[in-house]
Image (tube, rainbow, N blue to C red):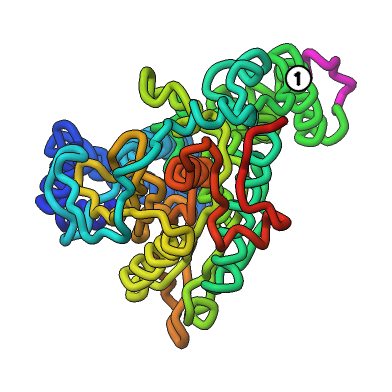
Amino acid sequence: MHDIKAIRDRSVDYVRGWARRGVAEAAEVVARALELDRALRAAQTAGQEALAARNAASKAIGAAMGRKDAAEAERLKGEVEGLKGVIAGAEETERRVGAELRDLLAGVKNLAADDVPEGEDEAGNVEVSTWGEPRRTGPAKDHADLGEALGMLDFEAAARMSGARFAVLKGGLARLERAVGQFMLDLQTTGHGYLEVNPPLLVRDEAMFGTGQLPKFREDLFEADGGALSIDDLLDHRERLLWAEAKRQFAGNPGGMSTSVLLDAFRRDLASDREDAFLNAALAPLTSDGRRWLIPTAEVSLTNLVRETILSEEELATPMRLTALTPCFRAEAGSAGRDTRGLIRQHQFSKVELVSIARPEDSAAEHERMTACAEAVLQKLELPYRRMLLCAGDMGFSAMKTFDLEVWLPSQGTYREISSCSNCGDFQARRMEARFKRAGEKKTEFVHTLNGSGLAVGRTLVAIMETYQDQDGRIAVPSVLLPYMGGVTHVERMP
């Protein structure tokens, strides 16, 4: 999320910054944001002035009545009624314009850090470093063919029960995948000081909005219907709400009015716009609470642990470091035709996620540390890889700087992404209202949030299968995984 005051003060920087990120018509976006900002502030001022005038007129009514000046009292009453309309109109304008401004700013990418290279797509990414010697000789069977030949990777059975982009792992391959995940989690917790968390896999809209998945990337998510009420249920509940409020307002049905007469009287008193606001607030829990989203990454759950909180500076003296091994679910709506076979791009996969919450002055160093923690996994598994600094046009929506780690896949003769480590600055924190307070200060500041894969388990398994395969079609178990494999040194074909 972006700070409208910053856009107001540095509009030229935002035009340039959004243009770097590939935002179409960046100048027009800034101009519209400033136009809405002016309209919003004008409505707020008009409402405040009308409210002050109404209060003054209401006070004057009492004085006029005290003087027995009935004519002046009536005139002032008319003025108050007119001001009520002005106040209501200003509130409606403020609500409508404020919502449009929030929606506009919520749909625009984070700005890139100054040291992020220019570029529109992956062609503009810069290689920072490499580690290990890529395997270019010997057998290089594709992992999907290798897994099927071992009898341990079954795409057809998965398709029959779940459709495309799912897989069934069996026997030694299933155990090897489990070992990979457990090794990663142990390394990050015992070796790198991350706190292990077992978070929810289903989250609400607010959590997805907080980390930037909603509203822009809705098509990439899996939605779970938690039993929200039907339209008929809601209409029935609407009448019960109105009836209960009408009875409360009219203090027990004076004069023995019928239900319909009482409701009509209450509606006239409430007025249609206020009735809608009342009902929307009352029905909101029934309409929104039923919907949940399957997390596309544990970044969502871990980062939202600090939503709507104010941390002390002491709590962030060392960045808060969190990790989780969870299933992840992605619709992959924009990846038609890409990696349709194998484990590279699945709807369901496991991943060890790393999340850090830091003070602004600590986030750059924490970004380097997090990336090194992810690199350590590949180094201990002896998997060759390279670190890439992504250009402005290739970074994710919420990121201001991103390092990708790409592992060598022998069957493809190229590097493929296995981890993405991003510093999001205060972009997500603004959406989540996540703040901290420095010692002795009254003012709060937004935290900085960082996230990275440490690593994607399925893609790591792919790299292990292809790198450690031998001429007999077996997969040697990397030495650091042997303690997790119960003495098994090779994954071999099932009998």
- Residue at the location (22% across, 53% down)? 112
- Residue at the location (52% across, 68% down)? 321
* Magenta span contains residue 258: yes
Badge 1 crowding class, 10 Å Cα cut-off, few under 14, some 14 to 19, many 20 or more, is: few
In the picture, residue 335 is in which quadrant?
A: top left
Q: Residue 50 or 340: which is nearer the viewer?
A: 340
Residue extending furthest toward the front: 472
Give the tally of numbered discs. 1
- Residue at the location (76% across, 17% down)? 233
Q: Is residue 53 visible to the viewer in this orientation of the structure?
A: no
Looking at the rendering, the stretch of residues picked out in magenta corresponds to: 254-263
From the top left corner, tell me how far across and down residue 437 is, in percent.
Answer: 47, 76
In the displayed structure, would residue 122 be above or below residue 447? above
* Dot 1 amino acid type: Glu
Q: Residue 81 or 447: which is nearer the viewer?
A: 447
According to the image, label 1 marks what residue?
Answer: 239
